[in-house]
Image (cartoon, grey):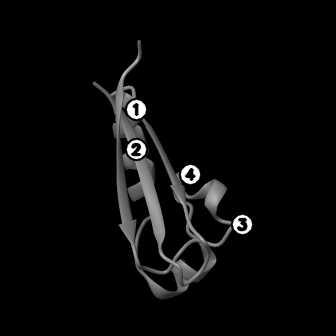
Amino acid sequence: EAREVICTVRDEGLGIAPIDLPHIFEKFYRASKESAERKGTGLGLTVCKLIVEAHDGRLWAASAGPGQGAVFYFTLPL
């Protein structure tokens, strides 16, 4: 029986457009709205995903769209 814990992180930030959501974990990916308003390298979520996956977990996100914040989920085995 595989057992895992699921963690959730919710924010009330910029949100993620549906067109950007499939790409946010790619190296150097910057959503068009975000790149105009915020500084960054586009590596933060990539690094998070690599760390979670190195521990045999999964990481994904959901957002209702711009201005709606986002929810990030990750699992880790128990």
From the viewer's perspective, is 70 left or right of 23? left
**Image quadrant where one finds the N terminus:** top left
Please tell me in which quadrant of the rendered image residue 30 appears: bottom right
Q: Is the residue 9 above or below the residue 26 in the image? A: below
> Which numbered disc, 1 or 4, marks the residue that appears first in the sequence?
4
Residue 42 is at least partly visible in this image: no
| Residue 39 visible in the snapshot | yes
Picture quarter with the C terminus: top left
Local packing at callout 3 (Cα closer than 10 Å; few below 14, some 14-19, many 20+) is few
Q: Look at label 3 and name its amino acid.
A: Ile
First in sequence: mark 1 vs mark 3: 3
Tag shown at residue 26: 4
In depth, the one of 74 and 33 nearer the eye is 74
Image coordinates of residue 2 in percent, x first then y, are: 41, 17
Do residues under tags 2 and 1 come within 8 Å of each other at their CB atoms? yes
Specify which label sits upstream in the sequence, 4 or 2.
Answer: 4
Circle 2 sits on which residue? 74
Q: How far apart are marks 1 and 3 (CA)?
A: 25 Å
Badges 3 and 2: C-beta atoms under 8 Å apart?
A: no
Residue at 60% x, 72% y is 64
Between 27 and 21, the residue placed more toward the observer is: 21
SS at circle 2? strand
Q: On the image, numbered disc 3 is attached to which residue?
A: 19
* Type of amino acid under label 2: Phe
Evaluate if marks 4 and 2 touch, with contact meaning CB atoms under 8 Å apart. no
Q: How crowded is mark 2: few (under 14 residues within 10 Å), some or many (20 or more)?
A: some
